[in-house]
Image: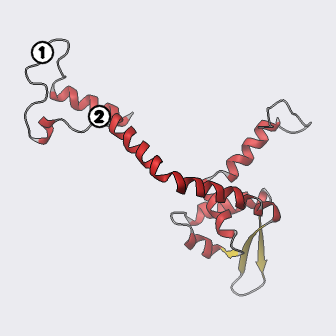
Amino acid sequence: MTATGSETVPGFAPASCRVRTVLNRIGDKWAIYVVDRLGAGPRRFSELLRGIDGITARMLTVTLRGLERDGILTRTVHAAVPPRVDYQLTPLGETLLDTIGQLVSWADAHLGEIEAARADYDARSCPPPYAEEAGGEEHGAGKRGADAEPDGDQERELRRHRLAG
């Protein structure tokens, strides 16, 4: 990375801070979706809202304003009844399309590996319930001393703590 924090411009924060704010904007999950949708051409607010699953109108508004402020897109208001507003990528915004496409391709190519890693992590972090909780024999029966399993209440409390943390 070139922004090491040592580069300063009078009246501005160090370059690393300025780069971080830009990366926070364009790395936001909603901004990525907006830029991707606008890559196909200008869109109205309602088209973007319908085309981006899970985004709220308020979050779309905030995202569009931030991207407009950073010069990634333009907002054009057309004199019509009802008023029509179009959003379109600027030439600067269009430079993000290849990068976003690479991220999507990477995620698609490695989705199986990521899902396997998640399953492995979850299996290690959240062990399945013991037999006694499933109605079977008591787990660890006959064990006593330092190697003994905790009693049922203690086991449940430990498991609850693991799941919460």
> Which quarter of the image is occupied by the C terminus?
top left
Three-letter amino acid code at the position of disc 2: Arg
Residue at image point 61% right, 58% down: 30
Residue at image point 69% right, 51% down: 25
Depicted 123 relative to depicted 25: above or below: above
Residue 8 x, y percent position in the rendering: 88, 34
> Which quarter of the image is occupied by the N terminus?
top right
Residue 12, image quadrant = top right
Q: Which mark is residue 154?
A: none
Residue at image point 71% right, 74% down: 41
Nearer-N-terminus badge (2/1): 1
Residue 149 x, y percent position in the rendering: 18, 22
Would you call the spot at circle 2 few (<14 residues within 10 Å), some (14-19), or many (20 or more)? few
Taking the image as shown, residue 136 lies to the left or right of residue 162, namely left
Would you call the spot at circle 1 few (<14 residues within 10 Å), some (14-19), or many (20 or more)? few
Residue 99 x, y percent position in the rendering: 70, 55
**Disc number lying in front (2 or 1):** 1
Secondary structure under badge 2?
Answer: helix
Residue 72 visible (yes or no):
no
Secondary structure under badge 1?
Answer: loop
Between 120 and 45, the one lying in front of the other is 120
Residue 31 x, y percent position in the rendering: 65, 58
Three-letter amino acid code at the position of disc 1: Arg
Residue 157 visible (yes or no):
yes
Q: Which mark is residue 144?
A: 1
Depicted 33 relative to depicted 51: above or below: above
Taking the image as shown, residue 78 lies to the left or right of residue 145, namely right
Tell me the residue that label 2 is attached to: 160
